[in-house]
Image (spheres, rainbow, N blue to C red):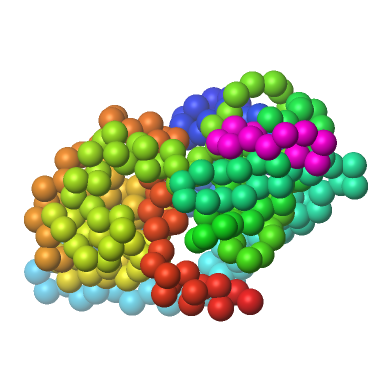
Amino acid sequence: MNELMRRMLFLPEQASTFALDVDRLHYFVITVTMVASLAVACVAIGFFWKYRRRRENQATPFIEPTPMFEVLAISVPLAFFLVWFAIGFRDFVKVSSPPPDAMDVYVQGKQWMWKFAYPEGPQSIGVMHIPANRPVRLLITSRDVIHSVFIPAFRIKMDALPGRYTEIWFTATKPGRYQILCAQWGKQVAVAQGCLRCHNVDTREPSTGPSWVDLYQQTTKLTDGREVIADEAYLTESMMEPTVKVVAGYQPLMPNYQGKLTGPEAAAIVEFIKSLRSDRTAQAIGGAEQ
């Protein structure tokens, strides 16, 4: 069942002790959401049929819900949210509490690469070497702007902040080669796909398409008048279905990348966009977090 759900949701393989816990919570949330959505759709169709207009001058019936119905309508969704929070908080505490015998790896982010240092070994750039079945703690910092260490197969992700150290730990459950998504790889994918012919990555000035500098978490106005937040979901949707939400002031010229980008490649481009912050924005974020 776990393998079937993982493939249905296009998730990468599970290669750490945290991966199964994270995926189980993901399955739980997705299943409850889909069942609830189906239930709401069925009730809506039933109400549409039961209370449909049968005569020209028929008045709309007034339905008075019972107190018990109101209690259930509030308490049941609240209970699920509390359960999700409890499971997520347990996993957060777990991933934030490395065991005392964990192996330390020092990680430094720099445009556009990762540097790894080991207490008893040489440094490496772009490739991290760790043993399987042994706890590993990553001590992470950045030399310039905000980055994020993201290893999809391990289900771990942690920001690298200039002037500060963050940490996260994991245990790889099987030997292998696993992708570490970073700005360097995201930029390579963006260049290979021709994204930088239309999007600026070194200035906020727009070109054929909106600039990627400071785009992440920015309020973006669309051609239909709506406003959206440029989060991970929006950025991914803009690559896969670019004509659904077109930014105001731009023509719908961007090609559809559905089927052209793999999941890890799309995630890498999103991470690259998230790292593109102007000096002013990076200083503001750093000041807010201190």
Left or right, 177 with respect to 171, comes to: left
Q: Position of residue 286 (x, y in %)?
A: 55, 73
Q: How many marks?
A: 0
Residue most extreme to the right? 100
Q: Position of residue 199 (x, y in %)?
A: 23, 53
Q: Quadrant of residue 84?
A: bottom right
Q: Quadrant of residue 77?
A: bottom right
Can residue 283 be seen from the camera position used here?
Answer: yes
Residue placed at 80% from the left, 41% from the top? Answer: 119
Residue placed at 63% from the left, 30% from the top? Answer: 14
Left or right, 13 with respect to 16, comes to: left
User: Is 179 placed above or below 29 here?
Assistant: above
Q: Position of residue 96 (x, y in %)?
A: 75, 55
Residue most extreme to the front? 122
The quadrant of the picture occupied by the N terminus is top right
Residue placed at 18% from the left, 55% from the top? Answer: 209
Residue placed at 38% from the left, 53% from the top? Answer: 273
Can residue 46 be seen from the camera position used here?
Answer: no
Q: Foreground: 208 or 4?
A: 208
Q: Is residue 120 magenta?
A: yes
Q: Is residue 231 magenta?
A: no
The residue segment tinted magenta is: 118-128
